[in-house]
Image (cartoon, rainbow, N blue to C red):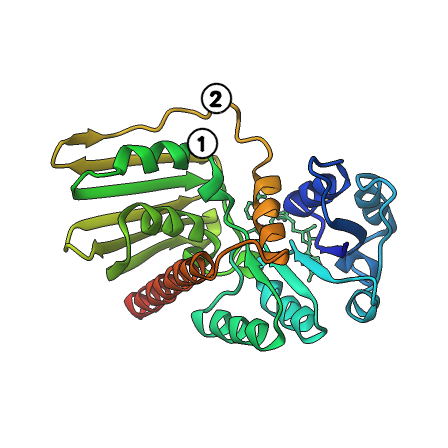
Amino acid sequence: MFGVVVVGVGRAGSVRIRDLQSPQLPPSPLKLIGFVSRLVTSKFYPRSYTQRELGNINEVKQISLQDALSSTEVDVAYICSENVSHEEYVRQFLSAGKHVLVEYPMTLSLAAAQELWKMAEEKGKILHEEHIELLTEEFAFLKNEVAGKKLLKGTLHFTGGPLEKERFGFLAFSSIARLSWLVSLFGELAVISATMEEQEEKKYLKMTVNLETVNKRPLTWIEERGPGLKRERHINFLFESGLLESIPPPTQGNKNIFLKDQDIFVKKLLGQMSTEDLAKEKKHILHCMKIADEIQKYCQHSKK
Ligand code: NAD
């Protein structure tokens, strides 16, 4: 059995706790030991807030970070906190000899991701970055549609509510799921240019990224965030054989995608994933990080 602590109890952390508490078939080798929340030590949160959070987590005990790091009962940490804290938590748990599952993005820079990966390899620990976007019905539909077709040009335009930079980091990292889709569908991509339109007082952001496939086909990624913007993906992929402009809504509502991600993690823990598949996944993740890094540089440069 692998003892697990969940760090950060927001939307993702709560789903992780629920999944760890639900009986699984075949039985899961994971055992929930407790959760770590910044609420336990923060003087900025009133007690009532802490209790409300605890109320959602049936019978799971809250433990301090130090106890989680030093306990021999804990073998695995799930890092489900805000993006800006991922890197440090991953580093601390790997240093303490624990396996780590981290919600995307693992870090907010390519260099940090490379360093953490090296550390995990040196320690002989699993470092798993969650990518639930690749486990959705929408992605399965696209993968199937795109197979065997020749892309001429394409656009992926995502809209959604505001995402605070201070908590979730630069947009190309916090929204790396879109890059992950594009790279999984069309292969490695090069960044041609990127710009960011920002209206701070309105909490509005629009990032426009011009990418190119290895066959020099243009792909545009637009990420637009602001109050009142619905969470939607608009696609326009022109292939030699025709145009793809819509994705059907999921029929099953994408239930249990975090659980599916956990199953992948368990396969890694149990040594059931081939070295080729592990290497392929690592390459994919680091390539997306590299693109996000480059986009950030382009956007910073265009601001000057
Ligand atoms: P959220 O805002 O609901 O939750 C974040 C939680 O982390 C909050 O409870 C906050 O109190 C806690 N937190 C913040 N800083 C902390 C710290 N230093 N130590 C401990 N806890 C801390 O956000 P979320 O949607 O749950 O997202 C969490 C992570 O999961 C993000 O990295 C996000 O990219 C990733 N993710 C979320 C989803 C989703 O569907 N919600 C999907 C994919 C990935």
Q: Which residue is drawn at 70% across and 40% down?
A: 19
Q: Quick check: marks 2 and 1 in contact, CB under 8 Å?
A: yes
Residue 35: image quadrant is bottom right
Q: Nearer the viewer, residue 161 or 88?
A: 88
Helix, strand or loop status at disc 1: helix
Q: Which residue is drawn at 32% across and 48% down?
A: 182
For label 1, the crowd category at 10 Å Cα-Cα, with few meaning under 14, some 14 to 19 and many 20 or more, is many
Q: What residue type is labelled 2?
A: Thr
The x and y percentages for residue 165 are 51, 58
For label 2, the crowd category at 10 Å Cα-Cα, with few meaning under 14, some 14 to 19 and many 20 or more, is few
Q: Which amino acid does label 1 sit on?
A: Glu
Q: Distance between the residues labelled 2 and 1?
A: 8 Å
Helix, strand or loop status at disc 2: loop
The residue carrying mark 1 has its beta carbon less than 8 Å from ligand 1: no
Which image quarter holds the N terminus?
bottom right
The x and y percentages for residue 63 are 84, 59
Q: In the figure, 121 relative to 191: above or below?
A: below
Q: Which residue is drawn at 58% across and 78% down?
A: 122
Of label 2 and label 1, which has the lower sequence position? 1
The x and y percentages for residue 273 are 52, 54
Give the residue pinned by disc 1: 137
Give the residue pinned by disc 2: 251
The x and y percentages for residue 245 are 26, 30
Q: Is residue 188 left or right of residue 67?
A: left
